[in-house]
Amino acid sequence: MNPLENFFKMGNIEKIEQLLDKIPTPIFMLNKEHKIIAWNRTCEALTGIAKEDIHGKNWQSLGFYDPPRPILADFLLDGAEAEKIRSFYGEKCHVAASNNGSWEGEDFFPNLNGGIWLYFTASLIKDDKGSVLGAVETLMDITSIKEKEFKLEKYNHRLIILHEVIRELSGETTLQGLLDKAVSLIGEKLNYPNISILAQEDPNKSEVSLSIKAASCLNKEQFSKLSDKLKKSGKGLSYKAAREMRIINTPSTSESEDFFPFLDNISSELDIPIIFSGTLLGVISVEGTVPFDEDDEKIFQIFADQLGVLWKVTESMEIIKRQASIDQLTGLPNRFLLFSRLKEEQHRLLRYGGQLSLAMMDLAGFKAINDNLGHFVGDKVLREVGKVLRSTLRQSDFCARFGGDEFVIFFPNVPHEEVLTAISRLRNALSSIHIEELPEKYHIEADFGLAFYPDDGKKLTQLLQLADQRMYDEKRRMQRLRE
């Protein structure tokens, strides 16, 4: 009889375990009947299971799997095919690299010592004739390795999401559109209860004053009221992040004196300042139900940095666009924006119907002011006229500088008689303008020409020409009266 086989049959397990106890690796042995016959001290320390509680039992009876299933050593003792082993373990289990008949794999054991990840190898014990006497299996706790692996996978996944978000945001052409889309995408893809972006009201001032500009789970109607409450409260983790120009990570909001809630049932908050070239633009405030970790800080710092760049680019684009469409002297829309708006109004009227009044306005005697008093005085007159037009007209009306001392006004859906009242109000306001450099003999007056949609036609460019013609008719008539 083979000595090793005799050793097993004699049940001389104590000597086996004395040998195994000297090995620092968790290791145990099974006999041919799948009973555990040896269990070293390192196995006890890893699993929390004492030798006396496991000797003579099989693994399935211990309830570490739900539902119960064999362990790797059991499959080897049964001579199971690879397909059967993989049907239980999947691709996590495979023939060992040594290719000596051993197998290796990894799995999570939720019922073992509070839940641990184990890496395990199993080999058969054979006599010199190749007969199977039992099996040996080793264990290694890889929980910390798997946690790091999962954490890295999660971080990389969020980086990919962040890249996709930034790519989508780069197409936004307005600052408000950029901020709205930013909170919407991040809130949706990273699944936080609420993400808000607060803007520094005046980036050129050192004093911090924030207002909510976008939020994933707040109504826009609440923005102004919440911003005022936040400002008056003297609190706010967002304000703290802004003032200190650093990330503020608050694991437990209930323990923070600075916490100001935007939503109910929020237990943690992460606030990240948005800084561009040393200037505070705003703060990203992320509300959560579990504490934020270092990876959250890293992800949102990257997001804040990228958002800061897009913020300034978009803001610059808006300024350029505004400068291209605004008359620099009067601050009114220029001729380019006038015809763009004329096109929009044409589409609106053709689709939805309604009425529109067009007024062409020309200053009376303006040429004499320029010729006799100089262009600087003439420019001052135009600036004052621009102020009067902006302050006198309704917000729904549209007024643009057509060129020189000519202006165009749209009155959408205003009855004819109300348009005439508005023109009369404008005449009075213009006549009250006082300019020191302007002698009393010069009066600021205007001539108007009106055209109405649809009464005078349905093509707005033609109506604009008609209003221009009527204005010159009025100008000639008034010149005769003034003479």
Image: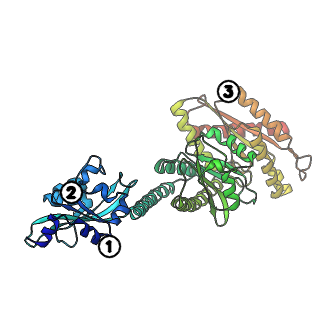
> Who comes first in sequence, dot 3 or dot 1?
1
Quadrant showing the N terminus: bottom left
In the drawing, what numbered circle is on residue 139? Answer: none
Disc 1 packing (10 Å; few <14; some 14–19; many ≥20): few
Label 3, label 1: how many angstroms apart (C-alpha)? 101 Å
Residue 4: x and y in percent read 15, 71
Nearer to us of marks 3 and 2 is: 2
Q: Which residue is mark 3?
A: 415
Tell me: residue 420, above or below residue 20: above
- Is residue 402 in view from this perspective? yes
Q: Which residue is mark 1?
A: 22
Q: In the image shown, does 457 or 283 lie closer to the viewer?
A: 283
> Who comes first in sequence, dot 1 or dot 2?
1
Give amino acid for label 3. Answer: Pro
Question: What secondary structure is found at the residue carrying circle 2?
Answer: loop
In-image side of 192 versus 23 (left or right): right
Q: Quarter of the image holding residue 148?
A: bottom left
Label 1, label 2: how many angstroms apart (C-alpha)? 22 Å
Give amino acid for label 2. Answer: Lys
Quadrant showing the C terminus: top right
> Who comes first in sequence, dot 3 or dot 2?
2
Q: Quarter of the image holding residue 422?
A: top right
Q: In the image shown, does 427 or 33 lie closer to the viewer?
A: 33
Give amino acid for label 1. Answer: Lys
Label 3, label 2: how many angstroms apart (C-alpha)? 98 Å
Residue 445: x and y in percent read 81, 41
Question: What secondary structure is found at the residue carrying circle 1?
Answer: loop
Q: Quarter of the image holding residue 75?
A: bottom left
In the drawing, what numbered circle is on residue 35? Answer: 2
